[in-house]
Image (cartoon, rainbow, N blue to C red):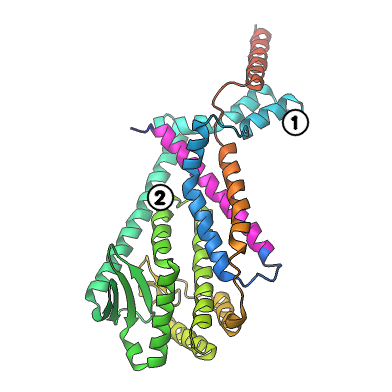
Amino acid sequence: MIPLDALLNAYIDANIILALAALLWLVTRATLARTSLRTAFSVELRLVYGLLIVIGCTPLLIAGIAMIGNPVAVNLSDFAVAQYLDGRFVMAPTQFEQLLMTRDMLVNDVVMLRTSTGQIIAALLIAGIGSALLRLAVSAFRLRQLIKNSFAWRRSGNLHIRLTDATVVPFSTIGLRRRYIIIPSAMLSQPADLKIALAHELQHIRQGDLHWELLLEIMRPLFVFNPAMSMFKREVERLRELACDQQLLQRSGLSPLDYGTCLLRVCRNALQKDPTRQIALPTVALLQVKAGGTSERFLRQRVTEIAHARHAANPGWMLPIVLLPLALMMTLGAVSIQRSGDWSQDRLMLSTIVNLERLNQRNGMN
């Protein structure tokens, strides 16, 4: 059985790696925005998906590096000790040692529940993750009920197209063995909008967006206190819609004018209803409608990009060129935050200095 302290340390490392990935992505996005590739939304979406894969593989990479003796001798705490001994910054030895041990002491407090701080942190973690899991379970139940109460309209293999009056926004979702496209019944009287909605959701299925949406919804409760998780969720939602619009208009004979008009019409219908009752998660919708309504800025961006979608480029060669350095930096960052496995010469020297300081303090008190 995995010890609780090891599990908590792994959880802390995962949150740090996620935050590092978010920072790297923000820098990458800002860089791409200054180039001619600023509208390469499909490539950007795959970059975000690639970063999420690297995050998931990082524990395996760390374990593999540990098995071969950690040839990459990079450790932030050891680096800090070396800088302190070189006199790069001034701090009392006991204070510096306590700073280095802050994480270990905090982990022990949470695991052993010895202090009020540890008890509060443990309670917040349990309450936060538990409530997020409960919300996900409720959303999944609502989604299951919506599908169960909908009308089976078309079927092709494991793809089921169903009609419902419970929503005005078309969406797609995934089950254990089936994929679903849920269409508002009112769209049957609007053949042009129906064609666009079906094509849009089928494009999401081709892009694999349903699986990624499910994965992100499962991840969110585990990182409920990490804003980087919310950032990645927003980025995926933004990029997958822009990429879907681009790819669909480039591959099909749909009119950009009809496409944009359909989007605005669905938005108008959605805003006339209660947004909190539109769609249960996890789903991928034609239009994201949440408790606060829709994002006017993002809707404006989608409509603008629809007008230029057929001329946008998404060079596939760019993906490995950008993703590989990001993966290497994330791996290096993940290795650097690991705790030192042994007592280096610098750490022995620091321990000696700390003991001498404590001995001087005791002699001064006598």
Does 20 appear above or below 91? below
Packing grade of label 2 (10 A; few <14, some 14-19, many >=20) is: some
Dots 1 and 2: beta carbons under 8 Å?
A: no
- Ranked by sequence position, the earlier of labels 1 and 2 is 1
Label 1 to label 2: alpha-carbon separation: 38 Å
- Whether residue 161 sits left or right of residue 325 in the image: it is left
Q: Helix, strand, or loop for circle 2?
A: helix
> Is 254 colored magenta in this rendering?
no
Find residue 355 and report its horizontal and vertical position in percent.
Answer: 63, 14
Find residue 56 and report its horizontal and vertical position in percent.
Answer: 46, 49
In front: 94, or 152?
152
Determine the residue positioned at 62% across, 63% down. 318
Determine the residue positioned at 39% across, 33% down. 4
Task: Give the magenta part as a residue range.
Answer: 4-31
Label 2, on which residue?
A: 128
Q: Helix, strand, or loop for circle 1?
A: loop
The label shown at residue 135 is none
Does 91 appear above or below 172? above
- Whether residue 110 sits left or right of residue 315 in the image: it is left
**Which quarter of the rendered picture does the C terminus lie within?**
top right
Packing grade of label 1 (10 A; few <14, some 14-19, many >=20) is: few
> Is 27 colored magenta in this rendering?
yes
In front: 309, or 125?
309
- Whether residue 89 sits left or right of residue 182 in the image: it is right
Q: What is the chief secondary structure element of the magenta stretch? A: helix
Label 1, on which residue?
A: 89
In front: 293, or 297?
297
Do we see residue 290 in this rendering? Answer: no
The type of residue carrying mark 2 is: Gly
Q: Residue furthest front?
A: 317
Do we see residue 228 in this rendering? Answer: yes
Find residue 224 and report its horizontal and vertical position in percent.
Answer: 45, 52
